[in-house]
Image (cartoon, rainbow, N blue to C red):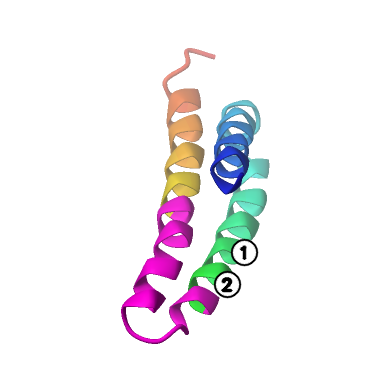
Amino acid sequence: MMIVGIVAVCVVLAVLAFLVPRLSKHPERGTQRTLGAGSRAGGKAPGVLGRIFSKPFRSSSKAVGKSGAAGRRGRGHMPF
């Protein structure tokens, strides 16, 4: 379920970044802040479990950043 949610957020951010690049920064930072909080909470588990629990949040945060950047980069290549 979490994977579907992250994919949906990435698609929405990519489209938003393509259509209105300036307005896409705030939702992207908010999403990354939320995922960072999840990663920090998961990292509090002891030992190897901490790394295992925090990894999905870190990789999701990275994906959100890449999708926003890709939308803005695609907009920069457009002729208008």
What is the number of callouts on the image? 2
Pointers 2 and 1 in contact (C-beta within 8 Å): yes
Q: Quadrant of the C terminus?
A: top right
Q: Secondary structure at mark 1?
A: helix
Highlighted magenta segment, given as a residue range: 41-61
Residue 34 or 54: which is nearer the viewer? 54
Task: Kindly give the residue lying farthest to the top in the view shown.
Answer: 79
Where is residue 41 shown, x and y percent of the image? 54, 78
Instruction: Categorize mark 1 by other alpha carbons within 10 Å: few (<14), some (14-19), many (20+).
Output: few
Residue 43 or 22: which is nearer the viewer? 43
Where is residue 64 shown, x and y percent of the image? 50, 46
In magenta stretch: residue 60: yes
> From the viewer's perspective, is 78 left or right of 38?
left
> From the viewer's perspective, is 18 left or right of 61?
right
Write down the quadrant of residue 4 in the picture.
top right
Relative to 14, say whether 32 is above or below: below
User: What residue is disc 2 on?
Assistant: 37
Q: Main secondary structure of the magenta part?
A: helix
Q: What's the residue type where badge 1 is placed?
A: Thr
Residue under the point 68% across and 43% down: 23
In magenta stretch: residue 5: no
Residue 54, numbered label: none
User: What residue is disc 1 on?
Assistant: 34
Q: What's the residue type where badge 2 is placed?
A: Ala
> From the viewer's perspective, is 48 left or right of 69?
left
Residue under the point 31% across and 77% down: 48
Task: Kindly give the residue lying farthest to the left in the view shown.
Answer: 48
Residue 68 or 55: which is nearer the viewer? 55
